[in-house]
Amino acid sequence: MVANSALIRAREGGGGKGRSWKWREMLRFPHISQCEDLAMSIERDYYSLCVKQPIGKKLFQLFCQSRPDLQNYISLQDALDTFETKCDEERRDFGIRIIQKYLMSQMIVVCVCVCGSYLSGEPFLQYQDSMFFDRFLQWKMVERQPITKHVFRQYRLLGKGGFGEVWACQVRATGMMYACKKLEKTHVKKRRGESMALNEKQILEGLDSRFVVNLAYAYETKHALCMVLTMMNGGDLRFHIYNIGAPGLEEDRVRFYAAEVCCGLMHLHQESIVYRDLKPENILLDDNGHIRISDLGLAVRLSESRMVRGRVGTLGYMAPEVISHEHYGKTVDWWGLGCLIYEMTAGQPPFRSRGEHPSTSDMERRILTQQEEYNDKFCQEVKDLCSLLLTKEPRQRLGCWGANGKEVQSHAFFKKINFRMLEAGLVEPPFKPDPRQVYCSDVQDIEEFSTVKGVILDQKDNNFYSKFNTGSVPITWQNEIIEMGCFRELNIFGPSGSRSPDLDW
Ligand code: ADP
Ligand code: MG
Ligand code: MG
């Protein structure tokens, strides 16, 4: 109980409350002369520096604001960003207003701007000579500070995984809450989990999706490798399906979670990643009731052949082509989505009743040959969707016809979902977790993690640790700095201490 209330209190801290009193010192800019090496080595890529990296984008905007000839571009860019957040009804009028304001007067300028090519030319060069870019380098130096366990405060244990525990933690300098997944070095070595651990970390650091947990930091301690991930306070779908009332979820929740998972899978697939471990316990809810896919330990990046082999996953959710040792690709995730939708609706998985423990071979036989059954909890649309996704032959399965999931989104079950709004995070979730509740097992009930003896760590292990131990992940870190208000408070220019061109943040 004490552990829970400390966590709840930390979660509620906003507006700078969770920050250490030394936070300014922790985020202090180095003198610009200390940024010279970085200035030499940093890749001068417009898209990475001024579009993708959130702090880079803000500083480039500030630079444009400071230049009368560029201000129009920035206000147009802002208008276009706002346009993306409008619901369908408001979009038309808003779009017309943009056209009237910008296109009528400066047709050519605007067209070039929309292509993004003008700003990446001359203005980008001038930016790199400005104090705004110097400031960007200073932020990058702060971003690249070594990460140790002292960067974080630790709260209660959240769960247990195969190689170690997951703890709630908070960045001292900003107050941001995260979940820290620890992999015990001795466990990893004993069970030869090195490539799996590195794989999970490398896949996560390359992703930036609102439907997949983000990696914020990767670091090591004497005994563990740590991945610091988006904090998901609302519990996993397994908990929500089975531990609250009668097993199963209402149709609106099934539809919403299925739609968000579908978007998450599409993001992974666009990056040529197959997830391979879709099941309720790997889908986590955040404070607002949005979901993210988590636990990418089994995810794999497809090579040119677009196929892999390997019997991995959790038996009850494995696709027929995995069970029968064939080469397979993204098809297995659409099967997984079918299992998930089935389980959310029925309150039990498709090929096993509650409390039943069939043998491995029996389970395999059912998946390969048995037709799943639909009771009256299934409306016509959800039944139709499940049976299309649970098609045994992968080439005939919904999602596998070449449109990368678009055909799943167009299914009648999702008619009520506006996928553009969903992708932009603008759809209100049908259920919001209670902020005063901790949706995980009591600390005492999470089994203690056993220690392994007789495993000696050597130089070869250190080589692997140094590949893992890469510190802050730029986009997530920069978002944290902005979201927690530190950017606004620290990004002050000039001896007078006046904040440079006021943008409405
Ligand atoms: P493993 O790969 O070893 O199975 P997981 O990534 O599934 O480890 O994490 C183990 C448990 O820790 C999960 O079942 C969940 O309870 C908790 N957990 C994992 N990631 C998060 C997160 N981002 N937020 C909150 N809890 C999490
Ligand atoms: Mg897991
Ligand atoms: Mg895992």
Image (tube, rainbow, N blue to C red):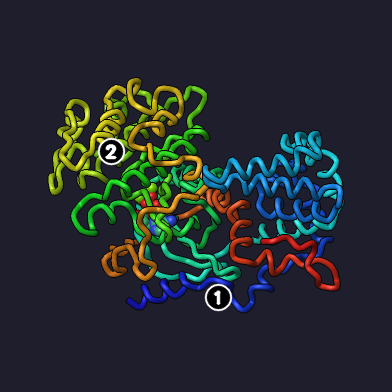
Viewer-proximal residue among 148 and 346: 346
What distance separates the C-alpha of mark 1 from that of mark 2?
42 Å
Rendering quarter of residue 140: bottom right
Q: Residue at x 17, y 31 (%)?
A: 366
- Establish whether ligand 2 lies closer than 8 Å to the Cβ of label 2: no
Which quadrant does the C terminus fall into?
Answer: bottom right
Q: Residue at x 72, y 59 (%)?
A: 139
Estimate the x, y position of residue 434 in percent, counting from the top left: 36, 66
What's the mark number on residue 167?
none
| Dot 2 amino acid type | Cys
Identify the element where label 1 is drawn. Answer: loop
* Residue 453 seen in the current view: no
Viewer-proximal residue among 386 and 226: 386
Check whether the beta carbons of the residues at disc 1 and disc 2 lie within 8 A of each other: no
What's the mark number on residue 17?
1
Q: Earlier in the sequence, mark 1 or mark 2?
A: 1
Viewer-proximal residue among 38 and 458: 38
Q: Label 1: how many residues lie within 10 Å, few (<14), some (14-19) or many (20+)?
A: few
Instruction: Check disc 2 and report the residue beneath it.
Output: 339
| Dot 1 amino acid type | Lys
Viewer-proximal residue among 34 and 368: 368
Estimate the x, y position of residue 15 in percent, counting from the top left: 57, 72
* Residue 261 seen in the current view: yes
